[in-house]
């Protein structure tokens, strides 16, 4: 018998989708959110790393984006419009599409689970820089 397991990334995306079904458009103003995601030594995360802003309060939609080779990103609201609604978010990181486990060797699971990065989207935001610690390799 095969056992099926949903990875944490897929589970997060399913929950965000279910949370936003029937929500329609954004209920708060959208603000452009862009910046970079870098390791604490200044190196960018792998190109295609997915950034997911999960609302910490009800009534607002999620936003997501992907990094380019230099770590830069621009977020898109669940409605398809550019930006994110005003509010508090938990930031989750997900492996680039097609990654076969290398991402989790670089990034600690706590970033995938959303326990490390938080972001408040405000009316007048400049570019943001999110810093990520590298996964500690067992010696």
Image (cartoon, rainbow, N blue to C red):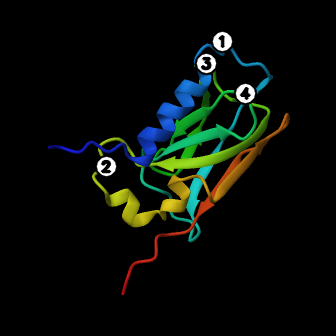
* Labelled pair 2, 1 in contact (Cβ < 8 Å): no
Closer to the eye: label 2 or 4: 4
32 vs 27, nearest the viewer: 27
Q: Quadrant of the C terminus?
A: bottom left
Q: Which mark is residue 24?
A: 1
Which residue matches tag 3?
Answer: 79
The earlier-in-sequence mark between 4 and 1 is: 1
Which residue matches tag 2?
Answer: 99
The earlier-in-sequence mark between 4 and 3 is: 4
SS under mark 1: loop
Query: In the drawing, does residue 133 fall left or right of residue 86?
Result: left
SS under mark 3: loop
* Labelled pair 1, 3 in contact (Cβ < 8 Å): yes
Q: Residue at x 70, y 43 (%)?
A: 89
The earlier-in-sequence mark between 2 and 1 is: 1
Separation of residues labelled 2 and 1 (CA atoms)? 32 Å
Q: Quadrant of the N terminus?
A: top left
The answer to whether 126 is drawn above or below residue 86 in the figure is below
Measured from the top left, where is residue 25 in percent x and y? 68, 14
Closer to the eye: label 1 or 3: 1
Separation of residues labelled 1 and 3 (CA atoms)? 7 Å
Separation of residues labelled 4 and 3 (CA atoms)? 11 Å
* Labelled pair 4, 3 in contact (Cβ < 8 Å): no
* Labelled pair 4, 1 in contact (Cβ < 8 Å): no
Q: Residues within 10 Å of mark 3 (few under 14, many from 20)?
A: some
Measured from the top left, where is residue 99 in percent x and y? 31, 49
Measured from the top left, where is residue 37 in percent x and y? 58, 53
The earlier-in-sequence mark between 1 and 3 is: 1
SS under mark 2: loop
Measured from the top left, where is residue 40 in percent x and y? 59, 69
Which residue matches tag 4?
Answer: 60
């Amino acid at each position: 018998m095969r056992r099926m397991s949903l990875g944490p990334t897929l589970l997060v995306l399913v929950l965000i989708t279910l949370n936003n079904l029937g929500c329609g458009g954004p209920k708060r103003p959208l603000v452009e959110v862009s910046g970079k995601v870098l390791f604490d030594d200044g190196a960018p995360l792998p190109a295609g790393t997915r950034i997911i802003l999960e609302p910490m309060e009800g009534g607002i939609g999620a936003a997501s984006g992907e990094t380019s080779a230099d770590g830069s990103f621009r977020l898109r609201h669940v409605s398809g419009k550019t930006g994110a609604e005003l509010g508090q978010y938990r930031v989750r990181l997900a492996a680039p599409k097609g990654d076969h486990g290398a991402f989790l060797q670089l990034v600690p699971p706590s970033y995938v689970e959303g326990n490390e990065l938080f972001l408040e989207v405000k009316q007048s935001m400049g570019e943001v820089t999110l810093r990520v610690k590298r996964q500690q390799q067992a010696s």
